[in-house]
Amino acid sequence: MRSISIFGATGSIGESAFDLLMGSGGPEAWRTVALTGGRNVARLAEMARALRAEIAVIADEALLPDLRAALAGTGTEAAAGTQAIAEAADRAADWSLSAIVGAAGLAPGLRVVERGGTLALANKESLVAAGRLLMGTAQRTGATILPVDSEHSAVFQCLEGGKLEGVELVTLTASGGAFRDWPLERLPHATVAEASSHPNWAMGQRITIDSASMFNKALEVIEAHEFFGLPGERIEVLVHPESIVHALVSYIDGGTLAHLGPPDMRHAIGHALHWPRREKLPLARLNLAAQGSLTFRAPCETRWPALALARQVIAQGGAAGAVLNAAKEQALDDFIAGRIRFTDMAGAVAHALDLAAGRPGFGASPDSLEAVLDWDAQARRDAAAWQTAAA
Ligand code: NAD
Ligand code: MG
C-alpha cells in the first residue's frame, strides 16, 4: 500500500487530489500520513476521517482546540502551526503533494526533498523563490520532484520524463484569464470580483487573479526554467483561449509534440500520483470534433507586463525569483484589499526588483530557507511601500 501526504488538502488542488484518492479505493488503497489545511477545520477533519489520516495539521494555531474536538475518537492526531506543518513533512510518506498556496508552501516541500522523498509539486512559488535550493537539494538527496502545474506536467509528458535531448523550444499556453479581451483602458478599473472569475479553470482565488494579470504565467516561465533547466529564450508563452493544449515541445528537426486535455487539474495530479505508470483516471475525455477549433495568438506585453518581468528575473538570477514571488504576493494582497489597482501590481513588483538589485548578495541564489525568507520579507516591505508612495 502506498503512503501519501497532502499539504494544502483543503484547497482547490488538495480537493482534486482527495477526489482522485477517494475514487481509487480511498483508505483501503492508500495509507494517508498527513493532511494539512490553512483555516478550514471542518473540511480538514472530514478529509482526515475519510482517509483515516495519521495526523491532520491546521496552519492557524488558534484553531487547534477546534481541530482536536473535530477529530475526537478518530485516532487521527491533531496539530497546528507552520512548524507542525513542516514537521509533518518529515514523516515518511511515499508521495507528498505540495499544494499550499504561496511561499508558505516552500518549507514543507523542502523538508520532503531533504529526506529524499517524492514531491508532487503544485506549489510553483517554491520553484520561483527557491529553484536552485530545491532542485540542488533533490539532486543531493536523490528526491524526485514531479510537476503538477498543468503546463509543466504537459511538458514533462512530452519529454517522456524530462529528457531534453534535441529540444529547441518549450511553449507554455495561457488562457489569457479574465481580461484577455478587455480594452486596455478598462484594466485599471478592474474589480477583485471581475479578476476572480476564470473563463476555463476552477481554481483558488489567488491563482485566478494571477491568471488575469499573467503573473501566473510569469511564475510558470520561471518555474519551467528552474525545473527543466532551459534558458529563458527557449521558453515561450502562447495565448490559447480554449485551454485544451497545455504545452508544446519543439525539437531541432522541426517536429513539435503537444499535450492536450480538458482543463481539469485531476489529470496532472493523477499523472504525478501514478508516475512512472499510467492508470485509468475517471476524467472527461477530449472530444475535438465537438470542440471544433483551437485558436492561438501571441501574448501582448502591454496588456501583460508580468511576462517581461519573468524574463528579467531569469536574466538576473540570484535572489530575483524570491523577490518577484514575494512582491507579487504582497501586491496581490494589496489589490484584494483594495489598496492598489489591478494594473498597479506589476509596478509594485518592478519597484521591489529594482530596490533588491541594489542590495548586497542579490546576485547569489539563496542557499537556505532562511535566506529565501529574508529576501521574501524585504520584497514584501518594498512592494507595500511602493503602494504608499504611489497613492
Ligand atoms: P487554494 O487557495 O485553493 O488552496 C491553498 C491551500 O493552502 C488551502 O488548503 C489553504 O488552506 C492552504 N493555505 C493557505 N495559506 C496557508 C498558509 N499560510 N499556511 C499553510 N497553509 C495555507 O489554492 P490552489 O488553487 O489549490 O493552489 C495551490 C497551489 O497550487 C498554488 O501554489 C497554485 O499556484 C498551484 N496551482 C494551482 C492550480 C489550480 O488549478 N488551482 C493549478 C496549477 C497550480
Ligand atoms: Mg499552470
Image (cartoon, rainbow, N blue to C red):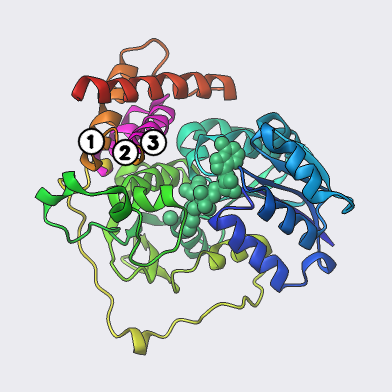
Dot placed on the residue nearer the N-terminal end, 1 or 2: 2
Q: Position of residue 13 (x, y in %)?
A: 56, 57
- Which quadrant would residue 280 be assigned to in this image? bottom right
Residue 92 to residue 193: above or below: above
Which three-letter amino acid code belongs to the residue tagged 2? Phe
Instruction: Please state the quadrant of the image where ligand 2 appears.
Output: bottom left
**In terms of depth relative to the viewer, which is nearer, 91 or 40?**
40
**In terms of depth relative to the viewer, which is nearer, 142 or 145?**
145
Which three-letter amino acid code belongs to the residue tagged 1? Asp
Question: Furthest-bottom residue in view?
Answer: 289
* Marks 3 and 2 in Cβ contact (< 8 Å): yes
* Marks 1 and 2 in Cβ contact (< 8 Å): yes
Residue 189 to residue 16: above or below: above
According to the picture, the residue beneath numbered tag 2 turns out to be 335
Q: Residues within 10 Å of mark 1 (few under 14, many from 20)?
A: some
Residue 249 to residue 9: above or below: below
Residue located 26% across and 34% down the image: 340
According to the picture, the residue beneath numbered tag 3 turns out to be 333
Q: Principal SS element in the magenta part?
A: helix
Start and end of the magenta stretch?
A: 307-334
